[in-house]
Amino acid sequence: MTGPDPANEPLTGPDGAPVTLGPVGQEIVFENEQVRVWEIELTPGQSQPWHHHLNPYLVIALEAADNRIDSIKGGEPRLVHEAVGGVVYREPGEIHMLTNHGDTRYRCRLVELKCLGENRG
């Protein structure tokens, strides 16, 4: 992949505080040369730390929730409802944080497509 690597740049959040990037998910449940599958589980109010996707990915909701996506650049957060069984495709993008903004547990599998990102070629 070309372009600057955000992991090598000093980062600050919208509030000016230093930011250390975390992993895309909480646990890798499957990985090979083509894909990496993460488990993510967030209780109400819990956040997945600031992170950056280097690969295109699919999000498959196993338990529904209302989530909030904050960009490290600031601005208005995106509010999204992820329904059970819903699937969303996303390209790699800006550094962001995911927070369970609802009152139910959120659980998903995030499938990184390494064959279209870090292992492309």
Image (cartoon, rainbow, N blue to C red):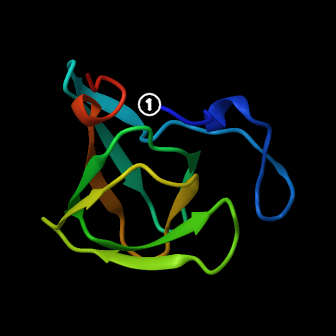
Q: Is residue 78 above or below residue 10?
A: below
The x and y percentages for residue 99 are 52, 64
Q: Quadrant of the N terminus?
A: top left
Residue 102's image quarter? bottom left
Residue, far right: 16
**At label 1, which amino acid type do we have?**
Met
Residue, far top: 33
Residue 31's image quarter? top left
As helix, strand or loop, the secondary structure at mark 1 comes to: loop
The residue carrying pointer 1 sits among few (fewer than 14), some (14 to 19) or many (20 or more) residues within 10 Å by Cα, namely few
The x and y percentages for residue 36 are 27, 30
**For the point 58% across and 52% down, which residue is it?**
95
The x and y percentages for residue 108 are 27, 53
Number of numbered tags placed on the structure image: 1
**For the point 71% across and 38% down, which residue is it?**
20
Q: Nearer the viewer, residue 48 or 69?
A: 69
- 61 sits left or right of 69 in the view: left
Residue 11's image quarter? top right
The x and y percentages for residue 15 are 83, 64
**For the point 36% across and 27% down, which residue is it?**
118
Q: Nearer the viewer, residue 102 or 9?
A: 9
Mark 1 sits on what residue?
Answer: 1
Q: Is residue 73 above or below residue 8?
A: below
Q: Quadrant of the C terminus?
A: top left
